Amino acid sequence: MTFLFWPILIIFLLVCVLLTAVILFQEPKQGGLGDALGGGGGDFSTSSGGTAGGLHRLTIALGVIWGLLALALAVVPRV
């Protein structure tokens, strides 16, 4: 099982870079932290269609993959 550590680490790093890029490509929908702390009355559950909806789904998918890979790296022993 130790031979799995390095391929998982490489995939993990690629997912990290992709996740960062996808998050930065998204357009802000809310007013930021001020709205989250009671400054605005925006609806957090809205999602627009088109590219923004696709990036949102891709962000969720990459986040789940990132979490699973992080767990795998914690379980798989290093050489």
Image (spheres, rainbow, N blue to C red):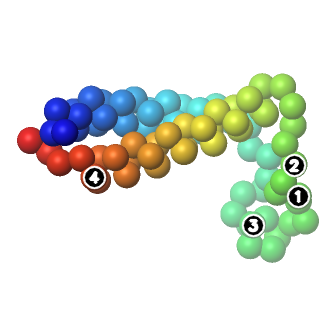
Which residue is under mark 3?
A: 36
Instruction: Give how far across and how far down residue 34 sits, in percent.
Output: 74, 66
Give the secondary structure at mark 2: loop
* Disc 2 to disc 4, C-alpha distance: 37 Å
Which residue is under mark 2?
A: 46
Q: Quadrant of residue 41?
A: bottom right
Which residue is under mark 1?
A: 43
Q: Nearer the viewer, mark 4 or mark 1?
A: 4
> Which mark is on residue 75?
4
- What type is the residue that disc 2 sits on? Thr
Q: Is residue 26 above or below residue 46?
A: above
* Disc 1 to disc 3, C-alpha distance: 10 Å
Q: Earlier in the sequence, mark 2 or mark 3?
A: 3
Q: Is residue 14 above or below residue 2?
A: above
Crowding near the residue tagged with mark 3, few <14, some 14–19, many ≥20 C-alpha atoms within 10 Å:
few
Which residue is farthest bottom?
A: 38
Query: Is residue 69 found left or right of 22 in the rendered image?
Result: left
Depth check: give the residue in front, 49 or 11.
11
Q: Are marks 4 and 1 in contact (CB under 8 Å)?
A: no
Which residue is farthest left?
A: 79
Q: Nearer the viewer, mark 2 or mark 4?
A: 4
Crowding near the residue tagged with mark 2, few <14, some 14–19, many ≥20 C-alpha atoms within 10 Å:
few
- What type is the residue that disc 1 sits on? Asp
Question: Residue at the location (60% across, 38% down)?
Answer: 61
- What type is the residue that disc 4 sits on? Val
